[in-house]
Amino acid sequence: MRGIIIKLEQIQKKLDNGTYMNQKDKLIKKVESIESEVRNKTYTHREVRYDNDVQAHLPVYRAWIRAGKYKTLSDLYELKHELSKEEINVLRANAIINKLISTNLHQKKVTATIRTFASRAKSKHGTTLTAR
């Protein structure tokens, strides 16, 4: 997970420096590698103690977790499209990267949503990106 964020920060640094025009193909390949890395991994929700009453909500939690993954893939696709344009909109590309980094690849919102519905008993919430 941290490796993906580091790659996004590297892309953002090149966009900010203005050195992206010479390395456009490399940036697109880097986004494609991030996209395939996310596609081949899955979000899992770990370290949660559920009550028996909450077991019925597990499919809903899984659906939220999958939705977070697909939102990440959608943003990466949009970033790749933005980078492949003749004239790159640097502000838009930076906004996409900032959103991915600040939301931790859309995991923070998933965790917050599950936290509102999960048991209030001593539980820890966190989604992680793991290999399938």
Image: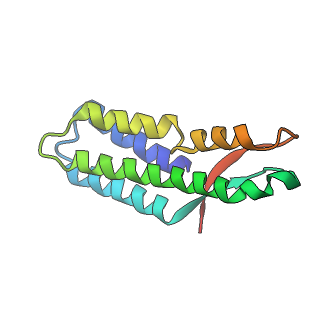
Q: Which residue does the image show at 58% across and 39% down from the upper left? A: 109
Quarter where residue 16 is shown: top left
Query: Picture coordinates of residue 29 (x, y %)?
Result: 30, 57
In the rendered view, how is the structure colored?
A: rainbow
| Front residue of 39 and 54 | 54
In the rendered view, tell whether residue 126 sits above or below residue 18.
below
Residue 91 seen in this snapshot: yes
In the rendered view, tell whether residue 87 sits above or below residue 25.
above
Residue 50 seen in this snapshot: no
| Front residue of 7 and 103 | 103
Query: Picture coordinates of residue 126 (x, y %)?
Result: 69, 45
Q: Which residue does the image show at 41% across and 44% down from the upper left? A: 8
Query: Picture coordinates of residue 102 (x, y %)?
Result: 50, 34
In the rendered view, tell whether residue 60 sits above or below residue 89.
below
Count of numbered tags: 0
Which residue is the extreme one toward the bottom? 132
Query: Picture coordinates of residue 103 (x, y %)?
Result: 52, 37
Task: Give the side of residue 22 with respect to residue 125, left or right.
Answer: left
Which residue is the extreme one toward the left? 86
Task: Give the side of residue 124 with respect to residue 103, left or right.
Answer: right
Quarter where residue 129 is shown: bottom right
In the rendered view, tell whether residue 43 sits above or below residue 20.
below
The quadrant of the picture occupied by the C terminus is bottom right
Task: Give the side of residue 120 with respect to residue 34, left or right.
Answer: right
Task: Give the side of residue 87 with respect to residue 15, left or right.
Answer: left
| Front residue of 34 and 96 | 96
Q: Which residue does the image show at 69% across and 53% down from the upper left? A: 45
